[in-house]
Image: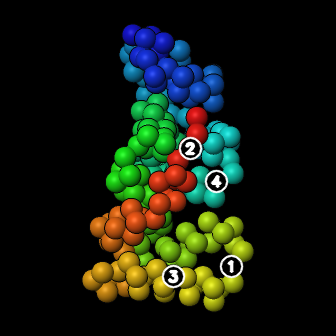
Amino acid sequence: MSPRAEGSHSGLFYRYQDLAPQLVPLDYTNRPDVKVPYELISSMPELKDNPFRRRIAQVFSENGDGHLSLDNFLDMFSVMSEMAPGDLKACYAFRIYDFNGDEYICARDLGQTLRGLTRGELSADEVRLVCEKVLAEADRDHDGRLSLEDFQNMILRAPDFLSTFHIRI
């Protein structure tokens, strides 16, 4: 089947193919094992100014290296679309903000997230204070870190989250 016959994903296929035309074939009949390197993924207009571009690519790549197969690329745009369900967005945001990969968001992960969101404009004391307040409010079992459930409860109460956690195509 040609990419044009696949409907809504065909535009994304061509975006993917345009990132590395010498690497990505136009014919995916045999589902080639191709991955576009992170360096090309991160240069996309939708990601190049995003402070979390590396984490986004790492989370959506199969082995965490940021190199994306076509399926990974489609998954990323699907989850990051404005139409994706809030709980799915929250799950992926959790994975993106869990920098140390321990399946919890600790104060260090929160600090890294906050520094990324504010582009380093807060002092260390301001970052610490915000992290303490977030943990005090969202850490329901008071273990000093946020589980996925804690994070989802916090994020889904934040109306701005769903409108800002997306990539426009």
The amino acid sitting under disc 3 is Cys
Spatial separation of the CA atoms under disc 4 and disc 2: 10 Å
* First of labels 3, 1 by sequence position: 1
* First of labels 2, 3 by sequence position: 3
When the figure is inspected, residue 124 is found, relative to residue 118, above or below; the finding is below
Spatial separation of the CA atoms under disc 1 and disc 2: 25 Å
Q: Is residue 10 left or right of residue 124?
A: left
Mark 4 highlights which residue?
50
Query: Residue 167 — which label?
Result: 2
**Do the CB atoms of the residues marked 1 and 2 lie less than 8 Å apart?**
no
The amino acid sitting under disc 2 is Ile
Query: Residue 131 — which label?
Result: 3
Counting from the top left corner in percent of width and height, residue 44 is at 65, 39
The nearer-to-camera label among 4 and 2 is: 2
Spatial separation of the CA atoms under disc 4 and disc 1: 18 Å
Q: Could you tell me which secondary element the residue under label 1 belongs to? A: loop
**Do the CB atoms of the residues marked 4 and 1 lie less than 8 Å apart?**
no
Q: How packed is label 1: few (under 14 Cα within 10 Å), some, or many (20 or more)?
A: few
Measuring 53% from the left and 27% from the top, which residue is drawn there? 12
Measuring 31% from the left and 85% from the top, which residue is drawn there? 143
Seen from the viewer's position, the closer of residues 29 and 132 is: 132
Counting from the top left corner in percent of width and height, residue 107 is at 47, 80
Q: Quadrant for the C terminus, please.
A: top right
Spatial separation of the CA atoms under disc 4 and disc 3: 21 Å
* First of labels 4, 2 by sequence position: 4
